[in-house]
Image (cartoon, helix red, strand yellow):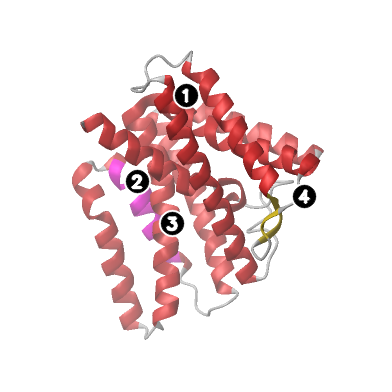
């Protein structure tokens, strides 16, 4: 528990520091984090398939993570297609099975677009929008952990993650909503009213929990407890950012379409 708290506080402080210091520094930090996540993902699927092309996975993830921020909208539009064509060419040249190809491609999009959304939120929405994402995701994680540990009785997804409970899920959602409500009184530059923020937080929190379950199912399929061991008390980068990888794209889509309208 002590290692988990210390590691979480240090990691959270670093993320806030890079996010606050500026767009470019944050993009570099996220790109490095995405590379570690891609390495962990390659290790997970490598347990069930052979010949993991770590260099290709890292390159594809980097393209997706940085395309919308370094090269502008044009490359961001075609980056997913470029990655798909590149992976397809590699698969055909090496006679890779279809299911293995899908695993690699899914990892590129899952990790690359997830982390790219975090950077896009910082670039286009500013630090306030990034902070909103962190409040929702961290609030959900903290609430689910402590409420689940204290009052959890009914399993949320027994076959995927036996330790997760319905009570913990509700507790995480409640803390995310409370944190968002408090934050709405200070973040005057966000483009939504407090009640709209609560609706957004509700959706982002639920999708974030789905991201947690998705990564848990991946680990169960691979037969491991954690995706890595780089973070004491937490496991790997994927273990820490599993919720963020689905929550960030959703929040970015909400911001993007509402800002257009």
Q: The C terminus lies in which quarter of the figure?
A: top left
Q: Is residue 261 left or right of residue 65?
A: left
Distance (Cα) linking label 4 and label 1:
39 Å
Secondary structure beneath dot 3 equals helix
Distance (Cα) linking label 2 and label 1:
18 Å
Q: Which residue is mark 3?
A: 110
Q: Earlier in the sequence, mark 3 or mark 1?
A: 1
Whether residues under marks 2 and 3 lie with C-beta atoms below 8 angstroms apart, the answer is no
Q: Which residue is mark 2?
A: 66
How far across and down, in percent of the image, does residue 72 sit? 23, 41
Distance (Cα) linking label 2 and label 3:
14 Å
Q: Earlier in the sequence, mark 2 or mark 1?
A: 1
Distance (Cα) linking label 4 and label 2:
42 Å
Q: Which residues are magenta?
A: 55-68
Distance (Cα) linking label 3 and label 4:
31 Å
Q: Earlier in the sequence, mark 4 or mark 1?
A: 1
Foreground residue among 122 and 35 = 122
Residue in the image at 69% along x and 44% along y: 167
Q: Main secondary structure of the magenta part?
A: helix
Residue in the image at 28% along x and 75% along y: 89
How far across and down, in percent of the image, does residue 186 sit? 48, 13
Residue 187 visible in the shown view: yes
How far across and down, in percent of the image, does residue 126 sit? 37, 25
- Residue 224 marker: none
Q: Which residue is mark 4?
A: 153
Secondary structure beneath dot 2 equals helix
Q: Which residue is mark 1?
A: 20
Q: Earlier in the sequence, mark 4 or mark 2?
A: 2
Mark 1, other Cα within 10 Å: few <14 / some 14–19 / many ≥20: some
């Amino acid at each position: 528990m002590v290692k988990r708290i210390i590691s979480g506080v240090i990691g959270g402080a670093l993320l806030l520091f890079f996010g606050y210091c500026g767009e470019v520094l944050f993009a570099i930090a996220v790109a490095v984090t995405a590379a570690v996540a891609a390495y962990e993902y390659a290790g997970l699927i490598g347990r069930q398939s052979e010949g993991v092309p770590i260099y290709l996975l890292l390159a594809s993830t980097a393209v997706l993570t940085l395309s919308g921020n370094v090269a502008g909208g044009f490359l961001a539009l075609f980056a997913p297609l470029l990655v798909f064509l590149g992976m397809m060419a590699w698969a055909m040249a090496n006679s890779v099975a279809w299911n293995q190809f899908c695993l690699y491609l899914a990892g590129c999009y899952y990790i690359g677009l997830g982390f790219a959304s975090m950077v896009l939120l910082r670039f286009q929405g500013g630090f306030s929008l990034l902070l909103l994402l962190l409040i929702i995701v961290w609030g959900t994680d903290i609430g689910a952990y402590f409420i689940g540990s204290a009052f959890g009785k009914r399993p949320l997804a027994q076959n995927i993650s036996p330790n997760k409970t319905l009570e913990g899920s509700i507790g995480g959602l409640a803390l995310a909503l409370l944190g968002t409500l408090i934050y709405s009184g200070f973040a005057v530059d966000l483009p939504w009213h407090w009640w709209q923020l609560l609706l957004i937080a509700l959706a982002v929190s639920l999708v974030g929990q789905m991201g947690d379950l998705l990564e848990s199912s991946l680990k169960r399929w691979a037969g491991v407890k954690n995706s890595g061991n780089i973070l004491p008390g937490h496991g790997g980068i994927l273990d820490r950012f599993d919720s963020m990888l689905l929550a960030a794209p959703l929040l970015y889509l909400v911001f993007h379409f509402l800002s257009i309208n």
